Image: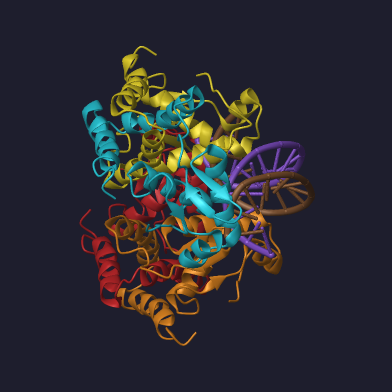
Chain colours: A yellow, B cyan, C orange, D red, E purple, F brown
Amino acid sequence: MIIRLDLQSELPIYTQLVHQIIEGIADGRLAPGEPLPSVRSLAADIGINLHTVNKAYSILKAEGFIQVHRQKGVVVQPGPMPGLTEEFRSRLKDQLRPLAAEAVSRGMEEEEFFRLVRETFGALTRNKGEG
Amino acid sequence: MIIRLDLQSELPIYTQLVHQIIEGIADGRLAPGEPLPSVRSLAADIGINLHTVNKAYSILKAEGFIQVHRQKGVVVQPGPMPGLTEEFRSRLKDQLRPLAAEAVSRGMEEEEFFRLVRETFGALTRNKGEG
Amino acid sequence: MIIRLDLQSELPIYTQLVHQIIEGIADGRLAPGEPLPSVRSLAADIGINLHTVNKAYSILKAEGFIQVHRQKGVVVQPGPMPGLTEEFRSRLKDQLRPLAAEAVSRGMEEEEFFRLVRETFGALTRNKGEG
Amino acid sequence: MIIRLDLQSELPIYTQLVHQIIEGIADGRLAPGEPLPSVRSLAADIGINLHTVNKAYSILKAEGFIQVHRQKGVVVQPGPMPGLTEEFRSRLKDQLRPLAAEAVSRGMEEEEFFRLVRETFGALTRNKGEG
DNA sequence: GTGGTCTAGACCACG
DNA sequence: GTGGTCTAGACCACA
């Protein structure tokens, strides 16, 4: 999978990495059980330190998106993905609120906001399973 | 306006402050031209550092959401609010993507995601102008 | 609080640190809301790297035993401590099992095993609140 | 005997194997003098590396829980099992302490802790000799 | 001054 | 070869 990083971004590299991998899982480019590159090789590939990759993997592991097998490697969670907990729904709403608020205060109509959301969501599910 | 801060949040306090004020503008609790508390009084009210309030106001001013007059104080932008630039649309999509991706990975249906977005957006516009 | 580390132990240093701090909370030497040393000063005090302390603090934070305030410092959880989840009970039993099994296979009587457990547990609660 | 392994566990596989066999001895499923599968067959049965089984057997042999004969194979210690050394008592207490401490911090009552210990211990001795 | 992030490089346990 | 741990040292955002 191709990883796109913006080293100038305000977002930490490991966060971008987490996002990219979750995105890969969401749109089907990363299938359950599929192996991920080792921390070393991924770090070398994208030109960052191995510890940064490690941190991203640790987060994904803690959240249940990937599994780390002892001294073997890393795979996309083959079993059930982390589910729709209330904690997640709550976090999602907390993160949507400032986005919606800025859109509203800039004068964005409900219609356009929904269109943007639909596009974003649709782009993930459209190709699902083809990857 | 009541400001809610989470001092343990990963989000910097000044960012939370920026969000809260934009939210206030979005839902109408803060009307154009309405005066905001001075840096000093707001800092004292919510028990945070002067610099923190200052940084939040600076960002809001730079983005055009408020005006800062040397003597007269701080007011919500009385003229045209910052508009729907392509830069904003692009940023909005970039920020929506990881949220949508995690929702999809966790098995959220399009329907529920839209419902959450609608709720969040609606909560802002429902009371608009009444505040 | 005095931290005792065994650098030769099979247990990672950060794990020992986590244990020591939880022990301090359990026996009352560390009261809710009490500040903990900064990562730098603690690392210097006990002669280890700041990252190792950081990892211990991160784990304690993730589990809810401490709070990390932005750019201020670290305090023992002032509110409700992490509770008695089923996940914890399950983990506790999983960790007790091999201990009990080795004791049994070495011929330890139930009576002595319980006595050891009672001593260990009692040593924590005996001085509670005097710390 | 059925061996249960968790390949995602933080515990090394060989440690899990050691635990399982000691547990088998403790609860009577493995009687003194009873033959154990060869390194090769056990490794094949549970689908792990030869070296891993070998390491587990080496530890069990070093501690005195099993005997390894060049040709005759591996048997559960037919003579006296490793006994209740002070070294073991000390290790046991060191391993119980962090468990008790976390339980106390999480607000577990002495009563429930003992109940869990009793259940765990009892589960081993209840069926002893029947296996 | 605080924690957060990132880099670089090392050694070890594991399988 | 893999991830896990530890060290050392640097820069930054935050308050």
B14 vs C81: above or below: above
Tell how many labels: 0
Q: Position of residue F13 (x, y in %)?
A: 61, 47
- C52 vs C97, left or right, is right
The residue that appears at 37% across and 67% down in the rendered structure is C81
The residue that appears at 58% across and 61% down in the rendered structure is B50
The residue that appears at 61% across and 53% down in the rendered structure is B70
Please tell me which residue lies in front, A35 or D28. A35
Q: Position of residue B32 (x, y in %)?
A: 41, 44
Please tell me which residue lies in front, C52 or D76. C52
C115 vs B22: above or below: below
Please tell me which residue lies in front, A35 or A93. A93
Give residue C107's quadrant in the image.
bottom left
- C86 vs A24, left or right, is left
Q: Which residue is farthest front? A: B72
Q: Is residue D126 visible?
A: yes
Q: Position of residue A17 (x, y in %)?
A: 52, 31
Q: Position of residue A37 (x, y in %)?
A: 53, 26
B95 vs C83: above or below: above
Q: Which residue is farthest top? A: A130
Q: Quadrant of the N terminus of chain B?
A: bottom left
A105 vs B7: above or below: above
Q: Is residue A72 visible?
A: no
Please tell me which residue lies in front, A110 or A99. A110
